[in-house]
Amino acid sequence: MLSTSPLLVHPLRLAGPGDQRLITDALDTAPGWSRDRSPDGVLRFTSPCRTAVITGEPATGHPGAWTVHGYRSPGSAPLWRASFAPGTPAEITAAFTTTLVHGLRSGHRDYLRGGPHHLPATPASVLADRGWRPDQSTPGFHDQVASDLTAVYRHRIGH
């Protein structure tokens, strides 16, 4: 007989991609976000202001592969990108996309200095506090790598 009780796995990344509905259900219920699927099976969610696009894996592809692009204005070149590889726990991707959805509603004011969700730390300092170390970076970027070498954080310097 199979158990229906949840199994806790630590560290979370060893749990695998998890239930992708954590991501899709939140985006499906986000006010104004549209959902469509390309002929090759790529699932796409577009923000009401068209400055954020979240794409999921092709229907026959790899569960857990998601890419998020941010734009200064609709139709412009991408301003930033976040990628989540296959196997990234859905909880991690959902935390990112949920924060993005809520932040777009207020122009991210809640997440900027002085806002109710502002934390006085940067993503890089949070990771450094947890043992991530600087890595060789492409000029113009800052890279940090997890101590077990399973993940990389990269951001463009000056953005």
Image (cartoon, rainbow, N blue to C red):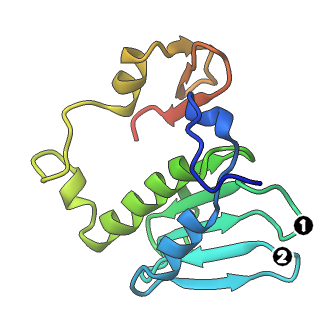
Q: Is residue 112 above or below residue 103?
A: above
Residue at x-position 42% and y-position 23%: 127
> Is 107 positioned to the left or the right of 69 in the image?
left
Q: Position of residue 33 (x, y in %)?
A: 48, 82
Residue at x-position 31% and y-position 31%: 122
- Viewer-side residue, 99 vs 18: 18
- Disc sitting over residue 135 in the figure: none
What is the three-letter code of the residue carrying label 2? Gly
Q: Position of residue 65 (x, y in %)?
A: 72, 54
Q: Quadrant of residue 1?
A: bottom right
Q: Is residue 102 above or below residue 135?
A: below
Q: Is residue 141 above or below residue 35?
A: above
- Viewer-side residue, 9 vs 138: 9
Q: Position of residue 101 (x, y in %)?
A: 40, 68
Q: Indicate the secondary structure of the residue bearing disc 2.
A: loop
Residue carrying label 2:
41
Residue at x-position 44% and y-position 83%: 48
Q: Quadrant of the C terminus?
A: top left
Q: How many marks?
A: 2
- Disc sitting over residue 60 in the figure: 1
Residue at x-position 20% and y-position 60%: 109
Q: Quadrant of residue 44?
A: bottom right
Q: Is residue 29 above or below residue 107?
A: below
Nearer the observer: mark 2 or 1; the answer is 1
Circles 2 and 1, Cβ within 8 Å, touching? The answer is: yes
What is the three-letter code of the residue carrying label 1? Thr
| Upstream in sequence: badge 2 or badge 1 | 2
Disc 1 packing (10 Å; few <14; some 14–19; many ≥20): few
